[in-house]
Image (cartoon, grey):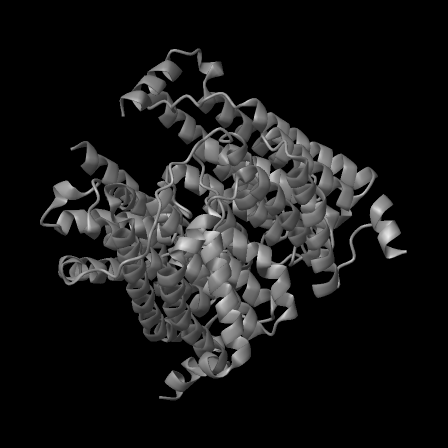
Amino acid sequence: MKNVQKQKRANKSLPFFFRDEFRVSLIITLISLALLITTFTFDIVPPILNRGIQPATFPKALLVLIIIMTLLVYYLATKNPWKVQKKLPKSFFLTLLSFLIFVVVSKTLDFFLAISALSIFVSYYWGEKRIIYLLLVGIIFPIIVFIFFETILGLRFPPGILTNIYYS
Amino acid sequence: MDNLLLMMAPLFSSKLLLVLFFGTLFGLILGVLPGLGPTTGGALILPFTMTLDPLSAIILLTSIYCAGTYGGAITAVLINTPGTPAAAATCLDGYPLAQKGEAGRALGMATVSSTVGGIFSVIILVFFAPILAQLAYEFGQPEYFALAIFGLTMLASIGEGSPIKNLIAGAFGILISTVGKDFMTSIDRFTFGINELTEGIGFIPVVVGLFAMSEMLTQSTLINQVFNRISLKAIKLPSKEDYKKTWKTILRSSGIGSFIGVLPAEGGTVASLIGYSEAKRFSKKPEEFGKGSIEGIAGAEAANNAATGGAMVPTLALGIPGSATTAVILTGLIIHGVRPGPDLFREQPDFLYGIFGAMLIANVLFFIFGFFGAKIFARITLVPNKILWPMIFAVSVCGTYSLNQSIIDVWLMLFFGVLGFFMRRYGFSVVPVIIGLILGELVEGTLRQSLVIFDGNWLMFFTRPIALTFFILSLIALAFPLIRSKNLKK
């Protein structure tokens, strides 16, 4: 309890633009505004074909509601600040990076290779240094999953360096 | 009598029994592993259910739901980390009791109260779901719209965390459901020129992302965390003394859990917290709570398992999910061409009562598995995260890809994983997003069709008694957190 109060006090001592509640509210509001502007580009149904409201009306109403509620969250947070979050560790950013690597490799090289690369990368940076276990999570297990999905569900994975060899 | 026979059908089919057996086993494993749970597990297994007939598929999902909810207690008692969010309240007394060398007694009580709570809720389900379905015949488009709004406001009101943040998350979930071609006019919305988005954003990438991938990111921040695991010799059935102390608590919590489950909220999580606090309020020895009270374990565990049957009531009778896992089950029903609602009760009673019976059997099965196998299941927690999570990633990626064979779905899953991580970090629950996504089409569709019926006159909503009742209940639900916080300040 004391820790939470300390964290809240620490948060209050920061300038408003550094506080989490301001940054989170700002991001939500900006994204919502951008999406709200996008709704004005939706096609308009001619009155003769239109039954009820236009397709853009419902999303517009939702986005306005989200913006109003976000401002309310910020207003309430000025009275009762959020607790300061701990800094994210290096392992988090490396895991995030591995997601990016996965997207790039799955798009350019191979889907299976992307799974394999991510598994080895994550397992290694999370502390697994034994080769046998890295092979297990990075190669043996993905192969089992791959074959399982392929045979049970009759799934065809996207083409790539390794999958092309397998399918040929 | 006919219905009772239909309920017993899974017992006479070796195939259904096998499905129940594996579903319960899989559910227990998922429940035991912290960070996973019946929602993620159900979503991951959804593509596999395509190889099964509809009854087997839904039985598989419901048995995972029942067993997974119980499984969380094993980890809560032995390593002080809830295997599922619904087992959070079990940690408060389960772990202190285990520290006193009574882990077997704590798990015995958790197993018995979970089973009683689960069976109680199935009885509620059997009696109340048909009544609710009968009432639903009176519902038109405006009533369904009002009901969906009531569901979302209840979720915000009694769900975990800030009600306004829950409402934002729910509205965001509905917004996701608007992506793709508008179902009334076929006009593209939020597709940004990406062809794959014209079909909309699927349920599986969102669920797996928000639950499994965001949890993977959370685990990445905890890689140096060390768990103190308490060894377990064997589960002990509660003694006569323990039964005397807890039978009222178990029954009360079963009632509370079933009621909370029926409301569209976070199901077991909220139910267990309320069950626990009510057990403390009614206890003759409230000072023992938090120090290893057997009543505390019974109160939390009976309530969270009782919420499973309760949450199935609106799911089957109205097509409105009572929890995140029932949202997955609802998706399973839709994928298999089964439309939940009153017609289901009239046209397919064998299907429905088969599910009810399977849930009853699943509760008995997890009692047996838990009682004889808790020691083995507890060992699953020894699998290190550095091995476990890359494996879960591989299954998540292939599972998400498999439903539509779309790589965009996999990328969306990763996007929602990152989003879910930051949502949780800043106190936004991810459950309302799931419920919002599943209710989105219903909310928009019924609103627009109602406005067509009313010729654009919004005020006509308030001339329909059932719709008006739901709107008033929604207002009460929104006011409830304000009243509660004022009372707490006093």
Is residue B190 in view from this perspective? Answer: no
Q: Residue furthest right?
A: A168
Which residue is at 27% across, 25% downward?
Answer: A1
Q: Nearer the viewer, residue B299 or B409?
A: B299
Which image quadrant: the C terminus of chain A?
bottom right
Q: On the rendered structure, is A136 left or right of B286?
A: right
Percent position (x, y) of residue B127?
A: 32, 75
Q: On the rendered structure, is B103 left or right of B447?
A: left
Percent position (x, y) of residue B413?
A: 63, 44
Is residue B247 in view from this perspective? Answer: yes
Percent position (x, y) of residue B132?
A: 37, 71
Q: On the rendered structure, is A61 left or right of B112?
A: right
Q: Nearer the viewer, residue B56 or B187?
A: B56
Q: Quadrant of residue A12?
A: top left
Which residue is at 47% across, 51% downward?
Answer: B37
Q: Nearer the viewer, residue B464 or B339?
A: B339
Percent position (x, y) of residue B459?
A: 42, 55
Tell me: residue A163, above or below residue B111.
above
Q: Nearer the viewer, residue B85 or B184?
A: B85
